[in-house]
Each structure stands twice: as structure tokens, then as C-alpha cells.
Image: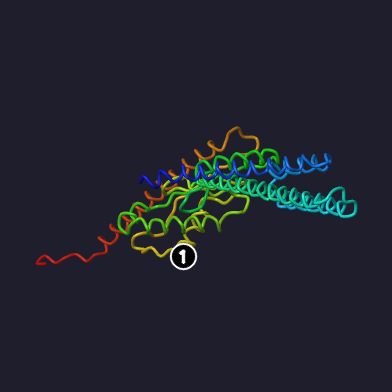
Amino acid sequence: MSRDSARAPATSVREALSFDLAAGTLSVAGIALLALTRDPGWTALLLVASIATVFGGVRSWVPVGVMALAATGFALVLAREVVFPAAPLHGVVWVAHGVALLASFALAVAIRRRFGRERGETERALAFAHDVAVHDPLTGLPNRRGLALLGAQILESAHRRGDAVYCVFIDIDGLAGVNAQLGHSAGDDVLLTVAEGLRRSTRATDAVARWGDDEFVVVGPGTGLAPLEMERRIRAHCLEHSSVDRNTWQARVSAGGSVLEPWDEGSIETILRLADREMRLRRALRRKSEATASGSARVENERRRPPRGLGG
């Protein structure tokens, strides 16, 4: 970090403190000038109004209302001085007091707006940090922490209604190969395509989350889609929308599911663990079946190949 950049925050803090000090001094001066007048009721009213302006809510009607109140009050006071003049130039003194007070109110409004702006910036920063903490930056889906929050709400709501809760665990087959052969940009394309396929394959009441590098999770009320149907829908979506070479990635995913019935004991972690176990089992059985089918095809091709002659 450069020396200038390190000095910048301290400079901005000093400027802010100087502004607050000047505004506070002028505000106190305006109130003091008003207190020297002969209308204590109006003084008390404007003191309350100034406090409401500085420390009131962020709604725009607070400073606007205060300014309107000040303008109306001083207009009445000046009208009284015109009708019942008490001393030469007394009305001019009231005008001077009024200008000072209005200036102090303007500065009070500026202070309030600066405080509101700083608080708004802080709230936006906290909201962004919270969003990053519970969402996957690539897909925009909830991450593990976000799923823990959503899953707990879904489970509690389902228990109140006497409903079941389902979970589907999805693993992208061959994502590591895509990253190795085509680069991580192609892998990101696969992840985004699968995430969009999951969004389109689930309901608004379901929570879709990215669980890990190549893993996604769906949690929702009821029994949900069967893992085989989830695989079919995602594969169809990926075949239509993914631009990754089919020789590198065949748009295949593996899914496993579990259901927590209303009378079952367990938590979101329980159905996640069961769905993950079924996904791994189904993937292993499919790979074994594909290997067996491939071996049988090779044997059949060897059997059908015509025998070579004795001299061949």
C-alpha cells in the first residue's frame, strides 16, 4: 500500500470531524440566538425540531417538515412585528435570527444525511458480505451455509404441516476431465449449465444449493423428483444448452435421493448423508454396468470377427 493511500482514510476522517464540529457550532449558535429572543415557547419548539432533524428517522419528510415549521413560525413572528412594532429595527433582528436558525437547520439536515449515507453504505457492505457468505459466487446458488439456513426453515415448516422433506444429491460426472482438457472456463460453463438445469427442474419451494466443487443439493417439502428423473432432466438441459465438446463431457450427472417422513427422527444432515450415500451407490452400479456392457461388446466383436486363414 502506498503512503498516499494510507494517508487518505485519516484525511477523510479529519474532514468529517471538522465538518461535524463546524456544523455543531453553527447549530448551537443559531439556537442560542433564538433563545435570546422573547418567545420561549417557539424556542422550545424549534429545539425539539432540531433534535428530531438530527436524530430522527431517515425519511425525507423529517427535515422537510422541520424546515417548513421553521419557515412558518418565523413568518408569523415577522408578521407580528409588522403589525405590532415594539422597537426600531426589531424586525430586522428577528430576520437575522431567522436566517441564522435556518442555516443551522440546513447544516443539521446535512449532518443527518451524511450519517444516513454512511449507515446506508455500512448496511450495504454488511448485506454484500452476508450474501457472499451464504451464496456461491459463480452460480449464485446458496452454498453450504446458505443451505443450512434454508434447509432448517424448510424442515421446520414441513414439520408444522405434517409433511415430508426430500433431498437429492447430484454429482457432475467428468468435470475434472473437462477442467484438465479444456480449462476451468469450460468447467465453469458446465457448472452454470447444470445449475440452470436444476433451477428449471425444481419448484419455487425447493432450495437448490452448490454443495462442493462438482456437487449440488436440492432440498424441499414433499417427496420431490426421483433421482433417475432428475438425472434425465439435467442431462436433457445440458445437451441442449452446454457448448462443451461432447467427446470430453457427455452431459452426465449422478443423483441420489432420500426422504424424511413426518414421523422420522432426523435433520437436514441426516437426509443429506443418506442422499449422498445413494448417489455414490447408484453411480458405482451404473459404472459397473457400463463396464460390463463394454466388455460384453468387445467379446461379441471378437467372436464375430472372421477367423484368419492358416497362411494369414
With 94 as the anchor, is 231 left or right in this view? left
At a point 40% along the width and 43% down the height, the residue shown is 6
What amino acid type should be assigned to the residue bearing mark 1? His
Q: x and y percent of residue 301 in the render?
A: 28, 62
Residue assigned mark 1: 241
Secondary structure under the numbered disc 1 in the rendered image: helix
Say how many tags the image has: 1
Q: Residue furthest front?
A: 88
Q: x and y percent of residue 218 in the render?
A: 54, 48
Q: How crowded is mark 1: few (under 14 residues within 10 Å), some or many (20 or more)?
A: some
Q: x and y percent of residue 141 in the render?
A: 52, 50
At a point 24% along the width and 65% down the height, the residue shown is 305
With 264 as the anchor, is 78 left or right in this view? right
Residue 290 vs 41, above or below: the answer is below
At a point 55% along the width and 56% down the height, the residue shown is 199
In-front residue for pair 40/307: 40
Q: Which residue lies furthest to the right in this view?
A: 84
With 72 as the anchor, is 136 left or right in this view? left
The part of the image, by quadrant, that contains residue 57 is top right
In-front residue for pair 171/114: 114
Q: x and y percent of residue 117 in the render?
A: 60, 49
In-front residue for pair 10/138: 10
